[in-house]
Amino acid sequence: MPRLKVLPHVELCPQGAELDAPTGVSILDTLLANHIDIEHACEKSCACTTCHVIVREGGDSLDPAEEKEEDMLDKAWGLEPDSRLGCQAKVRAADLTVEIPRYTINFAREGGTK
């Protein structure tokens, strides 16, 4: 089974973590199943950027992002070339290392307009 290494995040995972990552399960679902409570305001429908992660290692094993994910990522805080939405990126055979950005844009929580 592949491993998902989570780099330390001050609030969500201060010590970092190494998790079993079932093949075919999204990065977001793997994090949530292991009590790393990353935001997911749109309930995994690829309609926000709150589950934005940066894949530091192993990203080549992921399926390419689809157009809808790419469009949403353009709105993410701290976008990097290896950014993905955790709800869309599914673990494959390779181990992954991900970083959860320090900030996220959550219009619902922050009182934004629709």
Image (tube, grey):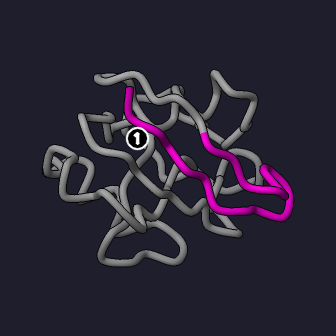
90 to 17, vertically: above or below: above
113 to 28, vertically: above or below: below
Q: Is residue 16 magenta?
A: yes
- The prevailing secondary structure element of the residues shown in magenta is loop
- Of 20 and 39, nearer the camera is 20
Secondary structure at numbered mark 1: loop
- Of 5 and 101, nearer the camera is 5
Give left or right: position of 55 versus 13.
Answer: left
Q: Is residue 39 magenta?
A: no
Q: Residue at x 73, y 36 (%)?
A: 37
Residue that lies at the very extreme toward the front in this rendered image: 1
Q: Residue at x 70, y 69 (%)?
A: 102
Amino acid type shown at disc 1:
Ala
Residue 18 lies in quadrant: top right
Q: Which residues are magenta?
A: 1-18
79 to 106, vertically: above or below: below
88 to 71, vertically: above or below: above
Q: Residues within 10 Å of mark 1 (few under 14, many from 20)?
A: some
Q: Which residue, given by chain and number where applicable, does mark 1 sit on?
A: 47
